[in-house]
Amino acid sequence: MENREGTAKYLNSPESLIYVKGKILYGLSLAKNEIRKLGKAILVEGYMDLISLYQSGIKNAVAVSGTAFTEEQAQLLSRYTKNVVLFFDADIAGIKASMRSVEILLKHDMNIKIASIPDGEDPDSYVNKYGKDKFEDLIKQAKNFLEYQTEYFQSQGMLDEPGKAADAIRELVKNVALIADVLKRNLLIKSIAKKFNLREKLLETELEKFIAQSGKQTINISRMRDLEETKNNSTIEASFPQTLSPEIYALERELIKLLFEGKESIIGLISEKIRIDQFTMPVHKEVVETVYNAFSNKEDLIAGSLIERIKDQKIQDYIIELTFDKYTISRNWEYLHPAMPYENILIKYTKDTIRKFNLEKLNQKIMQNYKRLEQINEESEKFELIKLIQIQQTEKYQIMHNE
């Protein structure tokens, strides 16, 4: 705004009820089709970075609006691609922002590369000086997150001394522990072991420690798979799905938190809109069935009474962990609607979660049908499948606009 050193390129207005930076990816409305088409997104820090890239013809970029990357932004981006190239500034703040963003993106099962920009440059200045082709060269040279972090630790001298090197390697393993895909984790551990000439077993021990620490905060998918295997008296016939959408997993957990709020109005809303068989995980189906039965029989709905109805101790422990965390359900909603009574906030949040869940389930069905369409040769079958997709698209439109 002023032509002097140390002055910001732009000033942010305060956040408001209709604009919360941490929940929005700047430019996504224009970039989403190109992101889908190219199969990847470029993530930059600021508005001007995004605008300059778009004007140069690079249209699959989105910006975090000059703020720290958030879980909500990762969730939003994961709807369009699993491949992300981070293009943050080359200064210390930009490098640290990249590191924090990697952690969040890994939790959402994203494939991450990080591009290096020459010192003193940012995406805005670089593309304006050197053009689209040179910028795309930087994209091609982007490194995966392990390579990037290793080079950063090396540049800081952290690999020169045994003590610091051990801390650096632990940081790499800590990030690997965030990945839900067991095969991907094992391949990355092999890569770290080979790079530092270490025994894989040693790194696997460190990995297990970090996974265990993470498990104290949230029940991860692998633990839930173990839980399914230990159930003896389950009436659920479906086996644990080998591939589980992180979005569906998170939404199912959120719905169960809401069911254990102990409020008839909330349980009534969820049971009216979501059937038991719509839940993916057998454990979740069993829990939901317990709550629905108590609700239909007009029995006690407080969390303690519902938990007592569940016979499996491991499932009880799982629900207790969820209910300890349920205070986070409406924190953002209370912030956005400070004058609204808590009960109304809870109902509004429940409706929003139900809508997201139904949309995500429907999106999965539509994507599966599109994949089937590519494999079918018979014209009559193709025609029937296209009709089904059209019906599902109409249903999706109704969910988006009528709830």
Image: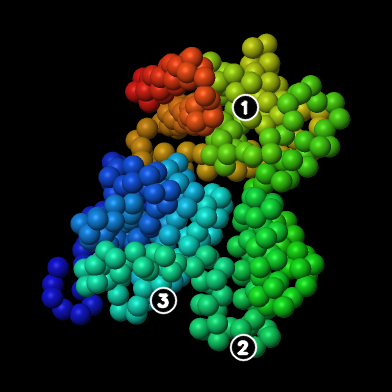
The quarter of the rendered structure image containing the C terminus is top left
SS under mark 2: loop
Question: Would residue 212 be found to the left or right of residue 277 on screen?
Answer: right
Query: Between 368 and 17, which is closer to the camera in this rendering?
Result: 368
The residue under label 1 is which amino acid type? Phe
Q: Quadrant of residue 146?
A: bottom right
> If you read the primary sequence from the N terminus, does the residue marked by circle 2 or circle 3 appear first?
3
The residue under label 3 is which amino acid type? Ile
SS under mark 3: helix
- Label 1 sits on residue: 279
- Label 2 sits on residue: 160
- Res 150 seen here: yes
Q: Give the residue at the far right of this rendering.
A: 232
Whole-angstrom CA distance, mark 3 to mark 1, is 44 Å
Q: Quadrant of residue 179?
A: bottom right
- Label 3 sits on residue: 92
> Counting other residues with Cα less than 10 Å from the Cα at mark 2, is it few (<14), some (14-19), or many (20 or more)?
few
> If you read the primary sequence from the N terminus, does the residue marked by circle 3 or circle 1 appear first?
3
- Residue at point 24%, 67% (across, down): 131
